[in-house]
Amino acid sequence: MDRFYTVEEVAERFRTSPAAIHTQRHRGVNPGALGIKILKRILWRESDLEEWIHEQAAEQHNVGAAS
Protein backbone atom coordinates (compact mmCIF):
# COMPACT_ATOMS: atom_id res chain seq x y z
CA MET A 1 0.00 0.00 0.00
CA ASP A 2 1.24 3.45 -0.92
CA ARG A 3 2.17 6.08 1.59
CA PHE A 4 0.61 9.47 1.01
CA TYR A 5 2.58 12.69 1.44
CA THR A 6 1.31 16.12 2.48
CA VAL A 7 2.28 19.24 0.57
CA GLU A 8 4.79 20.08 3.29
CA GLU A 9 6.44 16.67 2.94
CA VAL A 10 6.58 16.90 -0.86
CA ALA A 11 8.04 20.40 -0.63
CA GLU A 12 10.69 19.21 1.80
CA ARG A 13 11.54 16.22 -0.39
CA PHE A 14 12.04 18.44 -3.45
CA ARG A 15 13.66 21.25 -1.46
CA THR A 16 11.08 23.85 -2.33
CA SER A 17 8.15 25.56 -0.64
CA PRO A 18 4.60 24.32 -0.22
CA ALA A 19 3.48 27.38 -2.21
CA ALA A 20 5.69 26.30 -5.14
CA ILE A 21 4.16 22.81 -5.08
CA HIS A 22 0.66 24.28 -5.08
CA THR A 23 1.60 26.55 -8.01
CA GLN A 24 2.93 23.55 -9.94
CA ARG A 25 -0.31 21.71 -9.27
CA HIS A 26 -2.44 24.58 -10.59
CA ARG A 27 -0.22 24.93 -13.67
CA GLY A 28 -0.24 21.19 -14.33
CA VAL A 29 3.52 20.89 -13.86
CA ASN A 30 5.02 17.89 -12.06
CA PRO A 31 5.64 16.96 -9.33
CA GLY A 32 2.91 19.29 -8.11
CA ALA A 33 0.43 18.05 -10.71
CA LEU A 34 0.67 14.54 -9.30
CA GLY A 35 -1.33 15.58 -6.24
CA ILE A 36 -4.79 14.11 -5.83
CA LYS A 37 -7.66 15.54 -3.85
CA ILE A 38 -8.85 13.26 -1.07
CA LEU A 39 -11.73 14.80 0.84
CA LYS A 40 -10.49 18.35 1.47
CA ARG A 41 -6.76 17.65 1.26
CA ILE A 42 -4.32 17.37 -1.61
CA LEU A 43 -2.03 14.39 -1.14
CA TRP A 44 0.74 12.83 -3.20
CA ARG A 45 1.12 9.08 -3.59
CA GLU A 46 4.66 7.83 -3.00
CA SER A 47 4.63 5.57 -6.07
CA ASP A 48 3.63 8.51 -8.33
CA LEU A 49 6.50 10.63 -7.00
CA GLU A 50 9.00 7.77 -7.38
CA GLU A 51 7.86 7.07 -10.94
CA TRP A 52 8.20 10.76 -11.84
CA ILE A 53 11.72 10.88 -10.37
CA HIS A 54 12.76 7.82 -12.41
CA GLU A 55 11.28 9.34 -15.59
CA GLN A 56 13.24 12.55 -15.00
CA ALA A 57 16.46 10.61 -14.47
CA ALA A 58 15.86 8.58 -17.64
CA GLU A 59 15.19 11.73 -19.70
CA GLN A 60 18.37 13.37 -18.41
CA HIS A 61 20.35 10.22 -19.16
CA ASN A 62 18.93 10.10 -22.70
CA VAL A 63 19.73 13.77 -23.31
CA GLY A 64 23.28 13.24 -22.03
CA ALA A 65 23.72 10.16 -24.22
CA ALA A 66 22.58 12.05 -27.33
CA SER A 67 25.22 14.76 -26.88
Image (cartoon, helix red, strand yellow):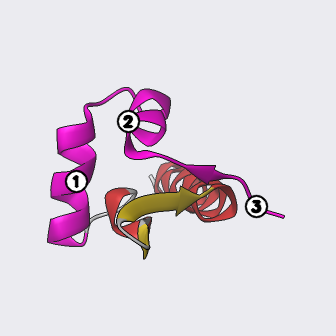
Q: At x 40% / y 57%, what residue is drawn?
A: 31
Q: Residue at x 51, y 59 (%)?
A: 44
Taking the spot 51% from the left edge, 56% from the top edge, the residue there is 56
Label 3 CA crowd tier, 10 Å (few <14, some 14–19, many 20+): few
Q: Residue furthest right?
A: 1
Disc number placed over residue 14 in the picture, else none? none
Q: Disc 2 or 1, which lies upstream in sequence?
A: 2
The residue labelled by disc 1 is 22
* Disc 1 from disc 3: Cα separation: 21 Å
Taking depth in this image into account, of 60 and 6 the one nearest to the observer is 6
Q: Secondary structure at mark 2?
A: helix
Question: Residue 33, can we see it?
Answer: yes
Task: Name the element at disc 3.
Answer: loop
Residue located beneath label 3 in the image: 2
Magenta stretch, main secondary structure class: helix
Lateral position of residue 41 relative to residue 60, left or right: left
Give the residue pinned by disc 2: 11
Work out whether 56 lies above or below 17.
Answer: below
**Badge 1 or badge 3: first in the primary sequence:** 3
Q: Is residue 62 visible?
A: no
32 falls in the magenta region:
no
Q: Which residues are magenta?
A: 1-28
Q: Is residue 13 covered in magenta?
A: yes
